[in-house]
Amino acid sequence: MDNFIWDKDRQSRTGVAEAIFCSHKSDQDLQAIIGFNLEQGNRVLLTRLSEQQWLLLPSELQDQLDYDKSSLTAMLNVELTITDGSLAPCEHVCIVTAGTSDLAIAKEAQRTLAFSGYQAPIFSDVGVAGLWRLMDKIDTIRQYKIIIALAGMEAALFSVLAGLVRAPIIAVPTSVGYGVSAGGKTALDSALASCSPGIMTVNIDNGFGAANAAIKIINQFS
Amino acid sequence: MDNFIWDKDRQSRTGVAEAIFCSHKSDQDLQAIIGFNLEQGNRVLLTRLSEQQWLLLPSELQDQLDYDKSSLTAMLNVELTITDGSLAPCEHVCIVTAGTSDLAIAKEAQRTLAFSGYQAPIFSDVGVAGLWRLMDKIDTIRQYKIIIALAGMEAALFSVLAGLVRAPIIAVPTSVGYGVSAGGKTALDSALASCSPGIMTVNIDNGFGAANAAIKIINQFS
Amino acid sequence: MDNFIWDKDRQSRTGVAEAIFCSHKSDQDLQAIIGFNLEQGNRVLLTRLSEQQWLLLPSELQDQLDYDKSSLTAMLNVELTITDGSLAPCEHVCIVTAGTSDLAIAKEAQRTLAFSGYQAPIFSDVGVAGLWRLMDKIDTIRQYKIIIALAGMEAALFSVLAGLVRAPIIAVPTSVGYGVSAGGKTALDSALASCSPGIMTVNIDNGFGAANAAIKIINQFS
Amino acid sequence: MDNFIWDKDRQSRTGVAEAIFCSHKSDQDLQAIIGFNLEQGNRVLLTRLSEQQWLLLPSELQDQLDYDKSSLTAMLNVELTITDGSLAPCEHVCIVTAGTSDLAIAKEAQRTLAFSGYQAPIFSDVGVAGLWRLMDKIDTIRQYKIIIALAGMEAALFSVLAGLVRAPIIAVPTSVGYGVSAGGKTALDSALASCSPGIMTVNIDNGFGAANAAIKIINQFS
Amino acid sequence: MDNFIWDKDRQSRTGVAEAIFCSHKSDQDLQAIIGFNLEQGNRVLLTRLSEQQWLLLPSELQDQLDYDKSSLTAMLNVELTITDGSLAPCEHVCIVTAGTSDLAIAKEAQRTLAFSGYQAPIFSDVGVAGLWRLMDKIDTIRQYKIIIALAGMEAALFSVLAGLVRAPIIAVPTSVGYGVSAGGKTALDSALASCSPGIMTVNIDNGFGAANAAIKIINQFS
Amino acid sequence: MDNFIWDKDRQSRTGVAEAIFCSHKSDQDLQAIIGFNLEQGNRVLLTRLSEQQWLLLPSELQDQLDYDKSSLTAMLNVELTITDGSLAPCEHVCIVTAGTSDLAIAKEAQRTLAFSGYQAPIFSDVGVAGLWRLMDKIDTIRQYKIIIALAGMEAALFSVLAGLVRAPIIAVPTSVGYGVSAGGKTALDSALASCSPGIMTVNIDNGFGAANAAIKIINQFS
Amino acid sequence: MDNFIWDKDRQSRTGVAEAIFCSHKSDQDLQAIIGFNLEQGNRVLLTRLSEQQWLLLPSELQDQLDYDKSSLTAMLNVELTITDGSLAPCEHVCIVTAGTSDLAIAKEAQRTLAFSGYQAPIFSDVGVAGLWRLMDKIDTIRQYKIIIALAGMEAALFSVLAGLVRAPIIAVPTSVGYGVSAGGKTALDSALASCSPGIMTVNIDNGFGAANAAIKIINQFS
Amino acid sequence: MDNFIWDKDRQSRTGVAEAIFCSHKSDQDLQAIIGFNLEQGNRVLLTRLSEQQWLLLPSELQDQLDYDKSSLTAMLNVELTITDGSLAPCEHVCIVTAGTSDLAIAKEAQRTLAFSGYQAPIFSDVGVAGLWRLMDKIDTIRQYKIIIALAGMEAALFSVLAGLVRAPIIAVPTSVGYGVSAGGKTALDSALASCSPGIMTVNIDNGFGAANAAIKIINQFS
């Protein structure tokens, strides 16, 4: 493993473990990194593992990975019970999406939380075009201490939500949209420029980062 | 008047009269254009007449103009009763602003409507950070057939409003904000990318254009 | 249907029914949403349903959908007579395109109007490079109360048209072009910055939004 | 007070009180808003109150305001002891800046925290060009549960810091820089794209927003 | 003259003489360059000489310069008859502007042409919002072999004009406008993306460059 | 042919015939347009006809078209002798490229000129990294009255060439490059901002437009 | 070889030999250029030779090329010993990468150096999220006179490294990342705006350029 | 000095001393920093010290500073002989500018070099519009081991120069220009995208950074 250095004490140093970002890695390097961690018995989260990359892995590595095609995440050496829903619900953090189209990224956040032992529910499709959908669920949402919110297009959900709750909002702008909102730049700027104070933002489509931020907050205050 | 051609039949051809856009015009050209229209007895609206340009006009021209410093508009040969509030209220169009900071542009829209004989009320400071402010007034707002909405920053007001009313929304993104929202680009893209269908947009800070669009709709359907 | 909430009163609340935006939705979610609406007997419009998504739907769902490959729209539980041309022509709105390349988006607008019961004609290929083509049809176009205009590249059509007619123009900038006009940004900015007042704009390639705006105007004034 | 609606229950609803954003407001509106709050006895924070706006306020209003020229903030009806350093230190949050040039925004954050009763220290000028400056103070910094970090230019501080501590980082990109970093866009994108997970970002130069986010976190977990 | 090298054979080599671009030059350098050319008896055109720079020149230099404040151009060692209108009209090139606001740049082009001995007329304020204004003059405009056209905002004039005449169009996008057209980018992209073939573009507000291009064409073909 | 209107007098009105821009056109529309022109015996140039569009045309239409895969152009009803090199050389215009990678666009220009009867030579690969390559050919290049120059990346060729010759330069920025020059924006801005006066620019990769501009100049002066 | 001119004295004139940039070249032109150089016995480096282009080359050309699929480089007429590691190590320059994902571009730099006879080691995956990884190797890295550093995302490595060593840093921003860092613009601006003086930058993903710059420095000082 | 930490070993650690970047610093902080260094007897370079900041310094501090208004640099505790030209010429590095307008930034580089003891000559106004100006001096320029080149607008000088010399080029794009080249972005991208390999770039207008990079190279190889 010349090309890769495992940051084994990142968990203790920062509160969140190193994860493998798979984009732009060659198939050989990816295989070597997974093999190394398998051998070492490291518990590892992989993100942005494309279906094409996944299909080119040797089947003996595939067998060891819990791969989720929708969120492009995989886990190595993780007891599967954690990720199939049997984890005890967590009162700290919930995930809210403006639309069904945001679900892939919502699941990246959910699985990153699950990897660290937090079972966060998703409240999906509560965008502000039909405000009653959000209002119907707002009392439940208010019970969580941190809200990870996802929205694409103009992402008005962030501002409305932040004006209604006490919880800090970690906004994840998504690349859902077309024309001026293609790529997620409008949703990002909307989060940053919100008239409702207290919104914090991560990169476009960065469900992983939002989950880690939430975990760091929980770590510090529990 | 070599440098300027008065489009005298624009009113009959398009339903809205030509207005004088004062930016980038030299002081000499501006004076000549106003003088020409004064002489001809033309009823004229001037927009974006900066305070500096206004102060450099000869006092005999100043005396003929109804100048409003906040909206940078002036009117020539217009009975002042129209613009001081004695116009009969119009049921067709109202103006809604997210914040007090949007008022200069709101007044540009209001005075453009007044110039054409429509007295439109302004509902100010109903941005979504405190949703109750909008909800308090939503039933009144719903009584108007067209809504001109103004918002800067992330402009979430456009989407929320459009999801609550039957009226078409003419969105005026404003340049209120800083950082990523400086200049109004985020508010503009927010209007264009809204998840609530039926929003139409004009240029940033273009209260004049929004008013003209409303007038054209009213013209066609009355 | 955990991931999706049907906004069933959107029609009565805003005058336009909810539509299903298919981009970024997983095949499973899409299938579930269509199945739900089929079961409920909801009359639904689907937009941006790519040919690839369409081909992956089960044939029993395909059979229930009136899919149009050029505009990427589909309708569920809609009497087909509406969309095959037998609808009575509507005097309220017409669609005008600068070029033949704009037709896919023009059809998205046309089918969205048809879904709501309005049969709008398309006047195609009247861009200003040959001004006589527009002039030949301008008297017919003038008979409509609202004009939905589509243009890509530099979109000069919007300004010329707005200077010639009393109707409000709902401009749909299209992504037709290359180099600086690739993606539709130049056409969009051209619509927003037009020297002809009274143009309102929607997002790039948003024929659906333009049609909904027209429907809201007609609703309010009929 | 027609143009302004006081969101009096924002504190109880969201955990942070409404503040007055002074940019783009006319001098008349500003004076009216301050007068209203003075009369009501409301405890209010004003942000982005430019020195020019401040100088145009009547002296009887100036006398009631605790104005800080460097951070462009003012407080109304706030006991001055809070803001002159006599507040008990808070163990929850500290402020870290890459350079001396970031201090104006750091003070906006500090005063916003002080307004809510939290006395946060500033660790200034610990940018990574001389890594030892950060290392010298890292053990002290690690004692805080939340870190508000400010940096302009390329903002490498955010990533280095996030890799060294357990605390969540609220990054405030500043507009310090020139050429490609003028305006703060490079610092912002650097925060968003960081290779160190767990960084959350607010708008460029938004010390106010970062402080409010920190307050919301503290509120939820104390 | 250490800091400046006069390209004395540029006229013979390229057909257009070197001009002095005054922006960003220090007052000392500017004075030295003008003094050098005065001494040498060089016939020189100065562009973008701001009023502030002009006012700081020694009066003995001012006396030798024919300075035009509106176009920010000056001429040294040029017989004044050329620039005060007594030059014989030229059948080769005319200048057309969309609005009165474009005149400053139109004059930069006109004076650059005059410096080389060509007297070009300006047809002002023929923008397409009132198409009849252009149509009224089109037959006269058609008599010129080259058209320099200026427009800001969305610059639809370029496309309409190019579709009506045989002459090549040299488009000068101007920075007239606000919002999305502030700075001239929309007008520039409009020229580049025009649906009418045969339009050539120069930099925003570059009347000087357009005139030089026209002169080079005339040089080559006369 | 409902969707398409042939601008049959464009040649006489503007000096250049209408061409068919094939991008974004549906296969059905494309086939109908070609069929119409075949039937009418119109001599037509098609541009941006992708290889995929070409392959989907019925073979009876393919047989009538002179298609060039490298430049994506095709000609209908044009005697093939014109395009295979037997046309008499034209002394008016030559084509110069910075690199071999610019040849596809150079050929679009060359074939557009050939379509109008002008046989223009291409001087390829004379970019300024090895200045001697340009200097070796500069005397030959100087014999042409108009130069169409193509360059991608930083496009320094435009400025160097314009400083060496009397001919006007029609610059065609190409999308050759990667990183900051991907898409051609750097080459375009380089052409527009050149320190050598007299350069005129067309859209990125617009060999067709450059050729048409040259034809219009030749038309006017011959 | 009409379309290509070999700059045979570039090595002696500038210190680095001409290389063949393969992007945008047609398969025919590429084949002709390689054939020409093969015939002439020229020692040549090819860059950005895509796998698709490689596969379309005739096998007799493939056999003569040392192609590396990961870096998309190939060498012609180069003794293979140079590129397979047997070259004597060079004390002048080393290559440092922030992550494993940067390796493709690192190899482009490494092979460009090898082509000129310099064997440079790669220190991979020392990004600042785990600062100890860099610190572990910093003493070794300090032994090199020039450092080529590669980083994507926010590229904080450049600033940290430049603050720790005496060597000049040639930064290669890479396109590794997504959202705001997709395409490499954030990494590029980070290099340019660094608070650590003495960083020099090349284009995004331009390992070839960085290696050539290093070679030019070594040439000048050895 | 709470707000400022002097990185006193930066010289020994990186080969270049810390400098004071004055932008965005408050007048109080600036005065404190200068006072501290004066007291400590530190030899210090200040950059981007605006004339307004300079004028607000107490005269006792002004007296200690060697301030240069054109380059906005000042030196503290530096023997004036170094900066007034009596330093022995250095054979390592020369400075080349495209135009007289680039001189302010050229002087920032020159004075930064002088601060470290290197006397570098400036060859001014050798831009490529008149290639002979560069050719006249190229043999002298070739005698320097490193070239710092400055250019604004389209910055073609970088590519031409790099193709003519063996020295590595450190390019400083300047903000000289208007329209698309305003701010220096076009010059920057031109440097990055150059077809001539071996160019390295620093931030726009960053003469200080270019000088430091040159010093680091000289340090390493002398």
Image: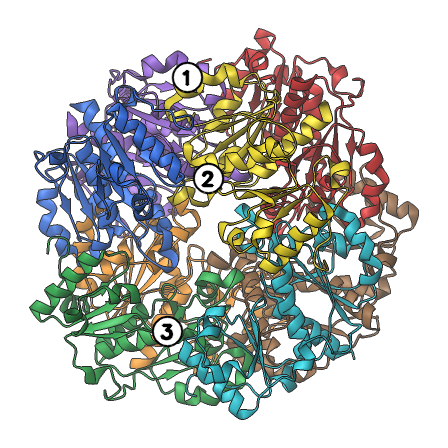
Chain colours: A orange, B blue, C purple, D green, E yellow, F red, G brown, H cyan
Do tag 1 and tag 3 residues touch (Cβ < 8 Å)?
A: no
Residue receiving disc 2? E186
Q: Is residue G79 left or right of residue H211?
A: right
Viewport quadrant of the C terminus of chain C: top left
Say which residue label 1 marks.
Answer: C134
Measure the C-alpha gap from mark 2 to mark 3.
36 Å
Q: Residues within 10 Å of mark 2 (few under 14, many from 20)?
A: many
Q: Is residue C18 visible?
A: no
Please tell me whether mark 2 sits on a helix, a strand or a loop.
helix
Quarter residue A189 falls in = bottom left
Q: Chain of mark 3?
A: D
Residue at point 74%, 73% (across, down): G93
Q: Callout 3, which amino acid?
A: Ala
| Between E34 and F191, the one nearer to me in the picture | E34
Mark 3 residue element? helix
Q: Position of residue E61 (x, y in %)?
A: 60, 50
